Structure formats: C-alpha cells, structure tokens
Image (spheres, grey):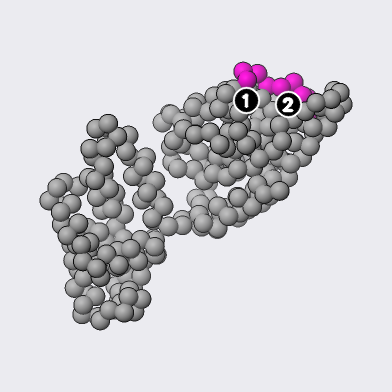
C-alpha cells in the first residue's frame, strides 16, 4: 500500500461510525455481517450506514458480496495487511521482511477462527534436551497417528543423543525408533523445513524460552511432563519415572488424535489443546 492509498484508508477510519464498523467486521471474521445486521448492531440508520460502508469499501478496508437483495460485508484482510505494512515499513531495522511475521500474526488473529484443514498434520514436540520426553512423544504419535500425523521433535539445548532408557521403553513396546535423534529446534524454523500445524512443549523450561518464529503460524500448547532423566534412585526407580512419562504422553496424544480436527474452528481447537495439557 502506497502513501496515497494509506491516506485514503486512514481518512476512512478517522470517522467514529466507520471505525466502529471496521472493528465490528474484524471481530466477525471471515463470516462477516449483512448490512442490516451492522446497522442494527451499531444503532445507525440504513442510509447513513450505506454511505459509510461504501467509503470503507472504496478505501479497500472491507468487501461486499451480494446475497439476494442483501449485501454481506467482511473485513478486507489484504487491505489491512497493506495498511499495517505501510505503518511498519520504517521498523525492523528498515527490513520489511522482518516485520512480515508480525504483520501476518496480527492479521491472522483478527481474521478470527478457521477450521483446520483435513490433511495429514505435521506436529513438533519440544523440550530442552530432546533426549527423552519429546523423543518419546514423536515416536508415540508417529505410530498412533500413522497416515494422519507426521511427528517431529527438537530441543532448545539438545543433549546430542537419545537417552538409552527412552529407547528401551519404546523398543519394549514395539514402537519404531529408527531415525530418532537429538537436534536443535531451529532446524524446523527455516523456510525449507516441514511447515508445522502444531507445536507442543512437553517441559516447562522449553515453554518459558523464546521460540523461533515457526513458518505457517502453527497452533501451540503446553503439555508439561516431569523430566524422567532427572529422577533419582535405583535403575528400577529410573525405569518407573520413564514409564510414567511415557504413560502421560501416550494418554495426551491419544486424546489429541481423537479430536475432530477438520470440524473444529481455531478457538475451539486451542481450548481443547490447552485442556489436554492440564493436570
């Protein structure tokens, strides 16, 4: 958006009624609202509302689609993205590309809930060392969600090797371990990496650390599990700690894979994901 278009957009929003209309349509998301519904919600007469809607549409901030005799209006998120880009073009060290994730995130939040696509989903499990919990979660989901999910794992400070006890419990349950290895999470932050649909942290340390900007803005949640590597005691007690971590992860993953992902909007899905991680 150039300065002339931006000036037109800002001028359109400088009037009280039009700003309220635009905010209302942002909250309505992709479904939008009929012109009559907008006027009723804001207590504005039809002719006054029609004039203001036309000004917003000419400014590239909303779109109108005819439905019989009525017109349904939605916020024009491409126009919003252009306006935000114009405002931020001098930010981010003069590099507009650095601002793009922020702009896209703001627009995605304003667009409102969307249903998840009905496709195989990529899921990334994160912890600090990527040696036990996230590794087990990756293996569990790849078996439980075969054909529907592709699981990966990584760590903020990778240990460099998978804990032998984690491999032992997986092999004992005939869960494939081939290809499992400890790695840093920035492996999945590049544009050539698989685009994630979900990112789950399974340790409190990883959840508190600043994560990379994941391409595609995946859904995220925290499913904290006690670290079995830190367990004290005999080898038998260490085995119990790993078995308990495995049980917690498997239980949560089973609930996750049973969710009707394609039929849930983003807000409903986020609540389900957060609930899975609660004690």
Magenta stretch: residue 163 in it? yes
Q: Is residue 123 visible?
A: no
The residue stretch that appears in magenta: 159-169
Q: Which dot marks residue 201?
A: none
Rendered position, 199 above or below 24: above
Residue shown at the point (64%, 32%) measured from the top left: 134
Q: Is 202 inside the magenta-drawn segment? A: no
Question: Left or right: where does residue 244 sit relative to residue 191?
Answer: right
Relative placement, left or right, of 190 versus 80 is right
Q: Are marks 2 and 1 in contact (CB under 8 Å)?
A: yes
According to the image, label 2 marks what residue? 229
Q: Nearer the viewer, residue 274 or 136?
A: 274
- Of residue 177 and residue 211, the one placed in the foreground of this image is 211
Q: Residue furthest left?
A: 4
Task: From the viewer's perspective, tell me whether residue 114 is left or right of residue 87.
Answer: right
Q: Quadrant of residue 93?
A: top left
Residue drawn at x 14%, y 47% is 3
Residue 194: percent from the left, percent from the top? 49, 33
Q: Which mark is residue 129?
A: 1
Q: CA distance from mark 2 to mark 1?
A: 10 Å
Q: Would residue 209 appear left or right of 71 to someone viewing this image?
A: right
- Residue drawn at (15%, 57%) of the image: 8
Q: Is residue 10 above or below residue 50?
A: above
- Residue at 79% across, 32% down: 241
Tell me where residue 99 appears, x and y as whole percent.
Answer: 32, 38
User: SS of the residue at dot 2?
Assistant: helix
Q: Position of residue 147 (x, y in %)?
A: 61, 41
User: Are there few (<14), some (14-19), or many (20+) residues within 10 Å of tag 1?
Assistant: many
């Amino acid at each position: 958006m150039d300065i002339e278009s931006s000036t037109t957009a800002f001028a359109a929003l400088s009037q009280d009624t039009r700003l309220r209309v635009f905010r209302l349509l942002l909250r309505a998301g992709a479904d939008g609202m009929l012109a009559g519904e907008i006027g009723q919600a804001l207590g504005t007469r039809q002719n006054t509302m029609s004039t203001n809607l036309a000004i917003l549409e000419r400014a590239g901030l909303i779109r109108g689609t005819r439905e019989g005799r009525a017109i349904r209006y939605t916020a024009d998120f491409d126009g919003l993205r252009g306006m935000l880009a114009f405002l931020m073009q001098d930010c981010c060290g003069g590099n507009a590309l650095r601002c793009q994730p922020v702009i896209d995130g703001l627009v995605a939040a304003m667009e409102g809930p969307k249903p998840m696509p009905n496709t195989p989903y990529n899921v990334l499990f994160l912890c600090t060392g990527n040696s036990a919990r996230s590794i087990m979660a990756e293996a569990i989901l790849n078996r439980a969600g075969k054909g529907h999910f592709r699981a990966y794992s990584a760590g903020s400070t990778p240990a460099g090797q998978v804990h032998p006890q984690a491999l032992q419990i997986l092999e004992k349950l005939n869960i494939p371990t081939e290809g499992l290895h400890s790695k840093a999470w920035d492996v999945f932050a590049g544009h050539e990496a698989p685009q994630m649909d979900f990112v789950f942290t399974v340790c409190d340390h990883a959840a508190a650390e600043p994560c990379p900007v994941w391409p595609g803005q995946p859904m995220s949640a925290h499913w904290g599990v006690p670290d079995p590597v830190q367990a004290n005691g005999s080898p038998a007690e260490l085995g119990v700690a790993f078995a308990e971590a495995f049980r917690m992860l498997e239980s949560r993953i089973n609930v996750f894979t049973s969710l009707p992902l394609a039929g849930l909007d983003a807000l409903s899905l986020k609540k389900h994901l957060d609930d899975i991680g609660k004690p």
